[in-house]
Amino acid sequence: MNAEYFRFRDERSGATVHRITGAEAISHPTYFLQSAFYPEDAGLFFISYRSGGAQLFEAEFPDGGIRQITSSGAIHPFSAALHPNRRDIVVTRGGGLWAVERLTRAERCIAQFDGAQLGESSISRDGEWLTAAVQRGAERGLVAGRFDGSSWHFIPFPRTVIHPQFHPLEPEWIEFSGDPAPRMHRVRRDGTGLECLHEHGNDEFIVHETFLGQTGDIVFTVWPRALSRMDWTTRRITTIVNYNAWHIAPNRAGSLVLCDTNHPDEGIQLIEVATGSRRLVCQSLASNGGSQWKTSRYALAEDFARARSEAKSGNLSWMETATDTVYGPQWTHPHPSWSSDESKIAFASDRTGVTQVYAAELPSAP
């Protein structure tokens, strides 16, 4: 049994909510672009700092015991992704990508880039290909290669890269975000065909783009005004709903989009793509840190300078550290994601003063 487990009903929606962790250490699910649940929702994996740096843990759902999976050097706290083989979890650590066999806890280095710092990772739908954001000195870009460790190479880009993702239907394509603007780009995994998908300036605050399930289109937020959709082929952009959707996670069919909200915080919502209608899943009651979310533009140099001064830190970047006061700390954001059978969600909340892992059961009907 999990002594940290606690179950309750959300006061506004009535949804059943499970608090999975409760230790006096930051714990949060993997990033909103990845599901934190194992198949059949038998359990979920998450990141916790309870043993020092960020490490990978898992728990049987809902109230099974908590087990540590990684124990070497700290991993990137938002890099974990479950491989389609259901056995391995891919993480980045320093300049390396690692496959962690969740049952035996054996680790295999897939690829190593000395002197680099790797960020978020993504796995192609067939499990053959991986990619990750990378910074190496003054260089920025992506790395891409095979899960078996072969064919790895560096794809340069002139600005910081975040959120790389394989196209769900065309795995030769990787969509990624350039920080700050213009935001949405794509490149083939061999490094060819680099192009910007939408030219825009600093005042069109596009964030949290991802693929709209298996439709192949892209869905994104124009913060804090709208949830929008881009046709992958024509680049035509349409508005799904004018709403302050924040971090977004579509279901596999691309018919629903899960999102948290901020300024104002209206809880975690479920948006119907066809109509734009929405319903409350539950409250997150997270503190939602980051001064930039009060504005409708990307951060400028002076915003980061102010954050450095306030944090008394010499280097703040929203890809490189989770303590950024411009766009974070990231662990104060709910980052909701779907469960394997899409009957539940996972999210983070620091409602108790320390960020913990939560799961909520979805209402059965609109």
Image (tube, rainbow, N blue to C red):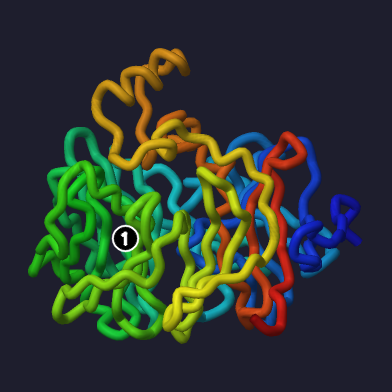
Looking at the rendered structure, the secondary structure element under dot 1 is strand
Mark 1 is surrounded, within 10 Å at the Cα level, by few (under 14), some (14 to 19) or many (20 or more) other residues, namely: many
- Residue 181 at x, y = what percent? 20, 46
Q: Residue 165's quadrant in the figure?
A: bottom left
In this orientation, does residue 123 appear? yes
Residue 145, above or below 206: below
Residue 86, above or below 282: below
User: Quarter of the image containing the C terminus?
Assistant: bottom right
> Residue at coordinates 80% horizontally, 66% vertically from top-left?
14
Residue position marked by numbered label 1 in the rendering: 164
- Residue 344 at x, y = what percent? 68, 73
Q: Residue 52's quadrant in the figure?
A: top right
Q: How many marks?
A: 1
> Residue at coordinates 64% horizontally, 63% vertically from top-left?
346
Q: Nearer the viewer, residue 145 or 336?
A: 336
Q: In this image, 138 relative to 346: left or right?
A: left
- Residue 313 at x, y = what percent? 42, 17
> Residue at coordinates 64% horizontally, 66% vertically from top-left?
280
- Residue 97 at x, y = what percent? 40, 56
Q: Nearer the viewer, residue 362 or 93?
A: 362
Amino acid found under the numbered disc labelled 1: Pro
User: Quarter of the image containing the N terminus?
Assistant: bottom right
